[in-house]
Image (cartoon, rainbow, N blue to C red):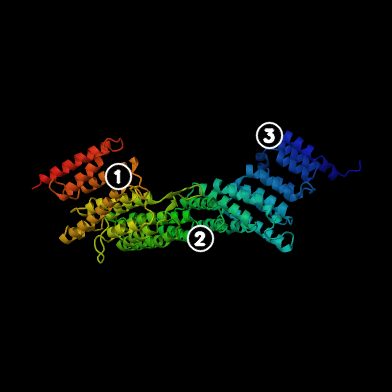
Amino acid sequence: LGVSDGEYLRISGPAVAFLLKALGAGADRGAFETVLAHYKDHCNDATVLAAIFEGFDANHVADNAVVCVQLAKRAEPSAAASTVKLLAALGRQFAAAPPPSHLRLPVLNEVWRVATRCTDLDDYVACATAWLDCILKHYSDREVKVLLADVLRHVDDAVESGAVEARDEETARPLEDLVGLLVRSCADIGAHVVLGSAHSLKLLDAFRPHRRSEIAKELLAGCGSTKTPLKDPALVHSILEVGRVAHDSLDCLSPDGEKLHVGALITGVLDNVDFGRDVEQQLGILVECRGAFPSLDVVLDRVVVDIARLAMKCRKLAGRAGGGHTDRTLGFAKACLAACHVTIPSLNRIFRRLALLALCGQVALLNGLLPHADACFKGAVQLIPDAPKTEAVAYGAGAEDAHTEERLAAFSKQFCGALVCAPGHPEHGPFYLVLGLLNALPRYQHWRPHTGAKASACLAAVPLLGALSQRRAPYRVAGVDGNDVLYGGAPEYLEELRKHLGAAVGAVVAELTAMGRDDARGNAPSDPQLLKRAELALDLVNALLPCVDVSADSDAGTFARNLVKLASKHKDARALKAYHARTVDALAAAAGKREGAP
């Protein structure tokens, strides 16, 4: 026929592969060794040997690993199966079933002496990908790093020789499968294996910017999905570098959903970072995140919360009775709160800044850092007039903007709760934060008339002042003397308190009066509006009961009964019926107790 043996084997290669696959299905080790013996005696073609490797069980190949490697090195290459492609087939089998443990390293060294001399980048990377799968599963981290370094060397040599161009599709195409294997291994095997080497990061430079950022996101997703804690600082830094690649691909035109996705991937990684008792290392990582991801609010938000948590963890680690600090842990707590204080202004959402400032102020109180607490609480009060009319409730493109007055009223209540145990200022007086809040709330420009939100916000100061009027505060922070200790019911203190209480009550009454008037168009108040007004009136009565004299002949008692009378117009409404009855009973009980007092 005029066809050479090599050409004949190339043409009949699929048939040979089919026959060997059929023969190898269910064959035992003896059958495999018999086929190898026939191959040695009658054939030396790489196409046939590749069909033998792929047709028989991987365990038989692994048991004869040394023989198979020697045969692969001596096999006559063909167009369909070069020596490197033959070694790649061997690597795929060893990934499924590795050689005996004492032979693994010698086999790998023998294979790579041949593979590393390959000058065809596509064939070399295909072989490296097959063996990388095997090495990730059955070898140590060292072998992974050596292989990745060799891959990078081949890529650099191909670029320098002009065979391919840097960051060209022809360069990146053969690396896709290899990098995809690394991405999958992040979740399956662990980030410490995949990203424990700088070579993994350098591989990303072979791709164009868009693809590089997509690979970075996939790597971050793999690192975030693993349940193994990240404790190696070098590894964490490598992962953050991957995160920086994803972050730097974003710009002002990037959709909010994309920013949220990248932020969620980075915070997922932070979930796994845990240095145990080494809180200084943990703080260093969080501070690095603050500088690395300045345009991702969701990451900065998480950084502040985690740093505040670190301050509390350090307090616990100090092990002092009552939660006190040593000199070293106190300095660390100060550093944490300072980091929070400089990070919070970077957030775009005002109400998250308010919430975080209040949180950090409470953390500072618990750690006995009164100047830091004052700075955080004061910063929150100063931020209130700048609150926008609408703001998204949550991060993300799907979050709808909502009017902020209800959220400001809710913040006012939570903030006043924190101020119960906050001591006054030696220069500005015991009530400077309360006074600042009462002055800041009217300066918010977006109160809607007749909704009751402004009255609710101002009303929060009434129970606060009532708590501060008590000889002993209802709750306190260990190691921090509140106003009950510092001022001890002094006449001047009580006189100033009554003055501020009158101002707070006056602000609430002014809003209740406005809610009962016709609106600017002359429309009478609606039923829901009047119902809300009645509810607020009852709230004010209940807030006043613990702190003022409501006996029958007192001005406060007359005022409280007038408020109850105002609410009585709606006492049969389902939403207020039980509340109104309980308030009437509580008012009667408080008046009786006052009148019966000696």
- Answer few, some or many: residues within 10 Å of disc 1's Cα (few below 14, many 20 plus, some between 14 and 19): many
Checking the image for residue 452, the label placed there is none
Task: Write the residue at 21% across / 45% down.
Answer: 562
Q: Position of residue 484 (x, y in %)?
A: 20, 56
Residue corresponding to mark 2: 292
Q: How many marks?
A: 3
Disc 1 to disc 3, C-alpha distance:
87 Å
Q: Position of residue 51 (x, y in %)?
A: 74, 41
Whether residue 393 is visible to the viewer of this picture, yes or no, is no
Task: Write the residue at 51% across / 51% down.
Answer: 260
Q: Position of residue 288 (x, y in %)?
A: 48, 61
- Answer few, some or many: residues within 10 Å of disc 2's Cα (few below 14, many 20 plus, some between 14 and 19): some
Instruction: Choose top left, top right, bottom left or bottom right for residue 325.
Output: bottom left
- Mark 1 or 3, nearer chain start: 3
Between residues 558 and 110, which one lies in front from this camera angle? 558
Between residues 5 and 331, which one lies in front from this camera angle? 331
Q: Nearer the viewer, mark 1 or mark 3?
A: 1
Q: Position of residue 478 (x, y in %)?
A: 26, 55
Between residues 358 and 114, which one lies in front from this camera angle? 358
Residue corresponding to mark 3: 28
Task: Write the residue at 56% across / 52% down.
Answer: 217
- Mark 2 or 3, nearer chain start: 3
> What amino acid type should be assigned to the residue bearing mark 1?
Arg
Q: Secondary structure at mark 1?
A: helix
Q: Is residue 118 left or right of residue 501?
A: right
Q: Nearer the viewer, mark 2 or mark 3?
A: 2
Q: Is residue 361 left or right of residue 264?
A: left
- Mark 2 or 1, nearer chain start: 2
Checking the image for residue 533, the label placed there is 1
